[in-house]
Image (cartoon, rainbow, N blue to C red):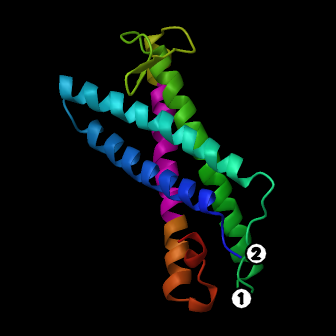
Amino acid sequence: MEYSKSRKLFHWLIALSVIGIGTLGLYMEGLEKSGFKFILYDYHKAFGVLALLFIIGLMVSRVGRESPQPPSGLSRGAVLTAKIVKLLMIVLIFAVIIFGYLASSAFPLKEGIWFFGVELPAIIGKDKELSHSLIEIHNTLAITLLAVSLLHILGVLKHRFFDKENDVLERML
């Protein structure tokens, strides 16, 4: 049994989003304040909202559908670790996006969040100190998400190349 086409699609859209948004976020950290940097922030936020839609799509695509059973050769510890890592990634994606949205909402120099030509509303009041604190949480969660995602990728590659009878990647391709 393999994953549904919609689940595969959302999985890869989320993977590309996490990698792309995370890379852009790290790149922006090193830039001087400029008009270019502020444009990149707008795109970073817009793609973050899009990633939220992808993760919601993934959750909807899971409703009423069973997941494939793990390969029979995997240990209970490996299966438990995979479940924990996947759950952590989902929770972290939601948390990163929510804290980013809250930080942007509180940022005093912008009214809303630009989403590809549509202005999404701020959901909390303007507060520079709160915005700074929320962005620190957002950044810490984002780095944690990238680290957990790397664990996920390394686990998949381990099973793909070293435990060939327990290849889990094939079901997601």
Farthest residue toward the right?
Answer: 64
Of the pair 149 and 117, the residue shown nearer to us: 117
Q: Is 84 rendered above or below residue 51?
A: below
Q: Is 81 rendered above or below residue 106?
A: below
Q: Amino acid at mark 2?
A: Gln
Q: Position of residue 52 (x, y in %)?
A: 55, 38
Which residue is denoted by mark 2 in the rendering?
A: 69
- Region of the chain picked out in magenta, as a range: 133-151
In the image, is residue 150 part of the stretch drawn in magenta?
A: yes
Q: Is residue 5 left or right of residue 100?
A: right
Mark 1 secondary-structure assignment: loop
Q: Position of residue 1 (x, y in %)?
A: 71, 76
- At horizontal 71% and vertical 88% (from top left) the residue drawn is 73
- At horizontal 67% and vertical 73% (from top left) the residue drawn is 2
Give the class, few, some or many, for how many residues have Cα within 10 Å of label 2's Cα (few <14, many ≥20): few
- At horizontal 44% and vertical 48% (from top left) the residue drawn is 17
- State the mark number for residue 131: none
Q: Position of residue 55 (x, y in %)?
A: 59, 45
Q: Amino acid at mark 1?
A: Gly
Q: Is 99 rendered above or below residue 119?
A: below
Which residue is denoted by mark 1 in the rendering?
A: 73
Q: Is residue 92 visible?
A: yes
In the image, is residue 39 part of the stretch drawn in magenta?
A: no
On the image, which quarter does residue 164 sit in? bottom right
Give the class, few, some or many, for how many residues have Cα within 10 Å of label 1's Cα (few <14, many ≥20): few
Q: Position of residue 19 (x, y in %)?
A: 41, 53
Spatial distance from mark 2 to mark 1, Cα to Cα?
11 Å
- Tag 2 and tag 1, C-beta contact below 8 Å: no
